[in-house]
């Protein structure tokens, strides 16, 4: 019996993973290793450039740096362990390790959910109040907004993880997933989890619907401001500053909303694993690509760090 878990008899879980075929696992190992290294390199490069180049010491790039840090944390929470399990016969994870993985994954994911609101607010201020941008988004407010997102994420994840891991696990311990994901672990509890599922659903609705609503409200105001711009070139330039954020938000919220807001009766382990891979592995890889390929300042900062010359950076995306 695990200390502090009076009703739990499971000391470890077995993660079934993506496949039981050795050949398939070898191919998946190479694919996901490349994805992990590319994501770590891309996000790490953005963090390094923002820190080293004083031209990028603005609220917009500060938030982009935080997003890259979140993406690196997000993929590192699950991917290294999955890579080990793809080549290992043993796919066990301790109860405490499962608890920690579920908490960190949830904390980083929820933080990113709320942080997209901050990035939407940044775009709102930049387009609707361009002359007061740095006055409104001063460094004190930027730090408070970032810290608030982290606090919200970690507190919400603590509630979710506590409710899930406090359930009694006294029977099967094979988790049909590649990491300790809440619904997959909770399905193994040897008691009725209906109440916990309802609490989890309410929390998920609040943490998904609220950010989406605020982001939509921000972009309605942004669209109204853009339509007031007389020149077509000016409207296109203003819209382009939001395109990257809109792309990332769409790809992040679509699978997350489907996974955590649908009824438990429609739960499909195999489908959930595929969707989880999308937002936990491919989204962290997508973000640096979306934000850097269209961003002249990031490109110029990279060339400057690599020693290809000096430049004068312009604002915006």
Image (cartoon, rainbow, N blue to C red):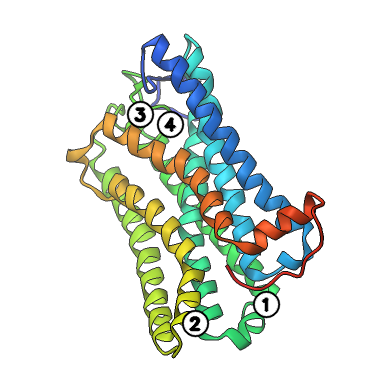
Q: Which mark is residue 168?
A: 3
The location of residue 212, given as percent across then percent down, is 36, 64
Q: Quadrant of the C terminus?
A: bottom right
Q: Nearer the viewer, mark 1 or mark 2?
A: 2
> In this rendering, would 181 be left or right of 304?
left
Task: Note whether 27 is above or below 199 in the view shown.
Answer: above
The quadrant where residue 280 appears: top left
3D distance between C-alphas at marks 4 and 3? 16 Å
Query: Circle 1 is placed at which residue position?
Result: 138
How far apart are labels 4 and 2 at the CA level?
Answer: 48 Å
Q: Nearer the viewer, residue 239 or 62?
A: 239
Does the CB distance between marks 3 and 1 fall below 8 Å?
no
Residue at (52, 31) in percent of width and height: 79
Residue carrying label 2: 234
Secondary structure under tag 1 reads: loop
Could you tell me which residue is drawn at 47 percent across and 48 percent down?
Answer: 109
Tell me what residue is drawn at x 47 percent, y 62 percent.
Answer: 245
Q: Are marks 4 and 2 in contact (CB under 8 Å)?
A: no
Between discs 2 and 3, the one toward the N terminus: 3
Q: Position of residue 138 (x, y in %)?
A: 67, 77
Per the model, the C-alpha gap separating discs 4 and 1 is: 39 Å
Q: CA distance from mark 1 to mark 2?
A: 26 Å
First-in-chain label (4 vs 2):
4
Residue at the disc numbered 4: 180
Q: Is residue 197 visible?
A: yes
User: Where in the figure is residue 60, as x and y percent of width and height?
Assistant: 61, 68
In the foreground, 92 or 216: 216
């Amino acid at each position: 019996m695990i200390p502090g878990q009076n009703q739990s008899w499971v000391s470890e879980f077995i993660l079934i993973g993506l496949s039981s075929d050795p050949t398939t696992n070898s191919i998946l190992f190479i694919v996901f290793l490349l994805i992990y290294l590319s994501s770590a390199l891309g996000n790490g490069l953005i963090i390094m450039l923002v820190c080293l180049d004083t031209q990028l010491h603005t609220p917009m790039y500060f938030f982009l740096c935080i997003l890259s840090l979140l993406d690196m944390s997000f993929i590192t929470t699950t991917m290294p362990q999955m890579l080990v399990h793809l080549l290992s016969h043993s796919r066990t994870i301790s109860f405490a390790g499962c608890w920690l993985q579920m908490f960190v994954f949830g904390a980083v994911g929820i933080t990113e959910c709320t942080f997209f609101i901050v990035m939407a607010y940044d775009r709102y201020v930049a387009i609707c109040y361009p002359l007061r941008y740095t006055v409104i988004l001063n460094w004190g407010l930027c730090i408070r907004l970032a810290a608030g997102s982290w606090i919200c994420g970690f507190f919400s994840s603590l509630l979710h993880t506590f409710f899930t891991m406090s359930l009694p696990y006294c029977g099967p311990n094979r988790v049909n997933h590649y990491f300790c994901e809440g619904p997959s672990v909770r399905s193994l509890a040897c008691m009725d989890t209906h109440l916990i599922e309802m609490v989890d659903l309410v929390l998920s609705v609040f943490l998904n619907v609220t950010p989406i609503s605020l982001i939509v409200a921000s972009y309605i105001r942004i669209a109204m401001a853009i339509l007031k711009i007389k020149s077509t070139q000016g409207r296109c330039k203003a819209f382009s500053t939001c395109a990257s954020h809109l792309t990332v938000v769409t790809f992040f919220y679509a699978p997350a909303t489907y996974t955590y807001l649908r009824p438990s009766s429609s739960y499909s382990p195999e489908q959930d694993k595929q969707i989880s891979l999308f937002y936990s592995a491919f989204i962290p890889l997508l973000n640096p690509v979306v934000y850097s390929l269209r961003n002249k300042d990031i490109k110029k900062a990279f060339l400057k760090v690599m020693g290809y010359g000096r430049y004068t950076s312009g604002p915006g995306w």
